[in-house]
Image (cartoon, helix red, strand yellow):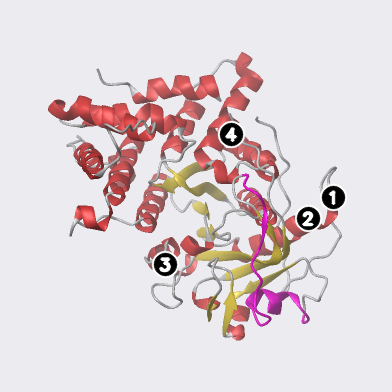
């Protein structure tokens, strides 16, 4: 018997899943091209004053630079483990929503559980639900975003984001086709969704295969081998290409429902899991192409001219179209693909750090690798307008161009290139710190 995805997961998500309000910040202030931090912001209890000032002032500078854009990509170092970068990005998003009219926040995270959260938010609940519902929604968002951002530094921001979504002021979604280890909605929904969409003769086989993969229920007698990968790819493709009735007057977004998007994403994920040797000459979309298509789908789905901010890594955000600079992904990045559609209405902001510590998803912290003395980060933060004591500096595109080809850790591994070809602006943080990992149940 096929499962009923939406009904099953509403029960799971609501049953298993903090909602508080966070003050929205005032309009972003203008600043000079390379802007130093000062210490005029009063720290909240328990927050180091330098960190508080860094977050608020750096966020104000970046938000002012991109406020008028239609789509903004906010990168972070590809390790996904820098607390101060997380904090600045969160404050930027708040400002863009509160003061610049941005109406969607999309993440480099699996699409699936965001659709589950969306459905729960849209489901009426009794007034008595109160705190329990708020806790459930915040847990749903944490699971959707994934373990990389389960940090104490982002806990209040996640509550704020859910609050904005419940109030109807912002839509939140995921762009990736990879189901994460925290994707409870995907595990409960996708097997039945695929089974219901597959041909009747394959329905039970396909449902069981998808459930086995998402629960990683492989054994010595039923391993995750080439045969199983082929089965999953075939099942997902059959489900994604099933005939579906749509009205001829429907918009592209209406023609592809959230369930359609999930099936398409699962099909591309399983196709890519097979690898080049297994799938032969058959083409399959890379992750960045999938994410670009999902941004386009969200743009069609949202109200006309709605502004979108994307939370991702610098490696995906880069707007360079090809080999210059040499990108570490081996494919054209998300930013380059979005630039084809939005041009000057797109802004891409890279984040990097001169020195400090980082930690990914609760693992032990470690130092950022040393940089050469002529690195972009060192030039931004030593001497000149920033001064030796500045906690951060913002480099706009003209300043990046004036630096010429310089080394930087923006792509993780130190790379030398003209960074103005990849980013519209770069925020450099002097001293990074590892986040405090707080896993959700």
Q: Residue 265 at what x, y percent from top left? A: 33, 44
Q: Main secondary structure of the magenta part?
A: loop
Contact between labelled residues 4 and 2, with CB atoms less than 8 Å apart? no
**Mark 2 falls on what kind of element?**
helix
Left/right placement of residue 79 relative to residue 159 reads: left
- Look at mark 3 in the image and give the residue it sits on: 336
**Mark 3 falls on what kind of element?**
helix
Residue 181 falls inside the magenta stretch: no
Q: Earlier in the sequence, mark 2 or mark 1?
A: 1
Quadrant for the C terminus in the image: top right
Q: Earlier in the sequence, mark 3 or mark 2?
A: 2
Q: Residue 348 at what x, y percent from top left? A: 53, 65
The disc at residue 51 is: 2
Q: Residue at x 45, y 67 (%)?
A: 328
- Look at mark 1 in the image and give the residue it sits on: 43
| 233 or 101, nearer to the observer | 233
Task: Please state which of the two labelled residues, at mark 2 or mark 1, is closer to the viewer.
Answer: 2
């Amino acid at each position: 018997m096929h499962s009923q995805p939406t009904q099953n997961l509403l029960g799971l998500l609501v049953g298993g899943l903090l909602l508080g309000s966070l003050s929205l910040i005032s309009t972003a202030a203008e600043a000079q091209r390379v802007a130093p931090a000062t210490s005029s912001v009063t720290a909240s209890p328990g927050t180091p004053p330098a960190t508080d000032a860094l977050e608020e002032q750096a966020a104000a500078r970046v938000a002012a630079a991109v406020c008028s854009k239609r789509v903004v990509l906010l990168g972070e170092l590809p390790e996904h483990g820098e607390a101060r970068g997380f904090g600045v990005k969160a404050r930027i998003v708040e400002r863009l929503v509160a003061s610049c009219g941005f109406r969607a926040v999309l993440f480099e995270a699996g699409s699936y559980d965001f659709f589950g959260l969306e459905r729960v938010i849209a489901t009426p609940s009794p007034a008595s639900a109160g705190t329990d519902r708020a806790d459930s929604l915040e847990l749903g968002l944490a699971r959707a975003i994934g373990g990389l951002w389960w940090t104490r530094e982002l806990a209040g921001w996640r509550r704020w984001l859910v609050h904005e979504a419940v109030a109807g002021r912002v839509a939140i979604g995921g762009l990736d086709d990879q189901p994460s280890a925290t994707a409870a909605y995907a595990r409960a929904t996708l097997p039945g969704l695929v089974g219901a969409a597959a041909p009747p003769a394959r329905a039970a086989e396909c449902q069981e295969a998808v459930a086995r993969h998402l629960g990683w229920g492989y054994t010595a007698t039923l391993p995750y081998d080439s045969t199983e990968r082929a089965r999953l790819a075939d099942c997902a493709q059959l489900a994604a290409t099933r005939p579906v009735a749509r009205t001829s007057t429907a918009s592209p977004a209406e023609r592809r429902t959230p369930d359609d998007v999930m099936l398409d994403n699962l099909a591309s994920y399983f196709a890519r899991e097979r690898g080049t040797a297994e799938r032969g000459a058959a083409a399959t979309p890379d992750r960045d192409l999938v994410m670009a298509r999902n941004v386009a789908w969200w743009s069609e789905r949202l109200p006309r001219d709605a502004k979108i901010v994307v939370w991702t890594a610098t490696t995906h955000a880069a707007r360079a179209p090809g080999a210059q600079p040499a990108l570490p992904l081996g494919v054209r990045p998300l930013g380059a693909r979005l630039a084809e559609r939005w041009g000057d209405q797109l802004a891409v902001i890279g984040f990097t750090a001169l020195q400090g510590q980082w930690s990914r998803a609760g693992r032990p912290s470690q130092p950022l690798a040393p940089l050469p003395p002529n690195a972009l980060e060192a030039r931004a933060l030593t001497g000149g307008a920033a001064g030796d004591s500045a906690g951060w500096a913002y480099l706009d595109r003209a300043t990046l161009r004036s630096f010429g080809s310089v080394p930087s850790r923006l792509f993780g591994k130190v790379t030398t290139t003209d960074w103005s070809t990849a980013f519209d602006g770069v925020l450099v943080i002097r001293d990074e710190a590892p986040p405090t990992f707080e896993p959700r149940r």
